[in-house]
Amino acid sequence: MGNEDPYFLPPGAESYNRDNPNARVKFYNTGHFAWETHVQQIGEDIYNFLKELPE
């Protein structure tokens, strides 16, 4: 999520941790269209997350 997103604010994303203590919330230094500006970094983070899941 972009920490500069004017529509989906960081406190909204952080509330996922309240609902699921195991949730991972990561902020990128970008706005609403994080995929357009940080696709490589976000893709790597998703890939690394999936690698950690049990088989």
Image: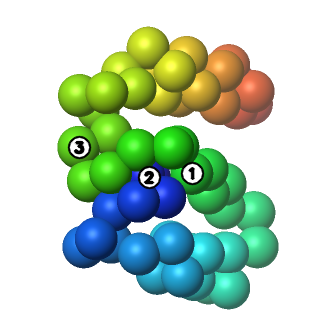
Q: State left or right for residue 7 relative to residue 26.
A: left
Instruction: Give the spatial CA distance, label 2 vs label 1.
Output: 5 Å
- Residue 38: image quadrant is top left
Q: State left or right for residue 42 relative to residue 21.
A: left
Q: Residue at x 44, y 14 (%)?
A: 40
**Nearer-the-camera pick, 31 or 14:** 31
Instruction: Give the spatial CA distance, label 3 vs label 2.
Output: 9 Å
- Residue 9: image quadrant is bottom left
Q: State left or right for residue 27 relative to residue 1.
A: right
Q: Quadrant of the C terminus?
A: top right
Disc on the earlier residue, 2 or 1: 2
Rendered location of residue 16, percent (x, y): 57, 75
Mark 3 nearby-residue class (10 Å; few <14, some 14–19, many ≥20): few
Rendered location of residue 15, percent (x, y): 57, 83
Say which element carries label 2: loop
Mark 1: amino acid: Phe
Q: Residue at x 32, y 51 (%)?
A: 31
From the image, tell me which residue sits under label 3: 33
Q: Is residue 10 visible?
A: yes
**Nearer-the-camera pick, 9 or 54:** 9
Rendered location of residue 54, percent (x, y): 74, 30
Mark 3: amino acid: Phe
Q: Residue at x 67, y 75 (%)?
A: 17
The answer to whether the residues at label 2 and label 1 have Cβ atoms under 8 Å apart is: yes
Say which element carries label 1: loop
From the image, tell me which residue sits under label 1: 27
Say which element carries label 3: loop
Mark 2: amino acid: Met
From the image, tell me which residue sits under label 2: 1
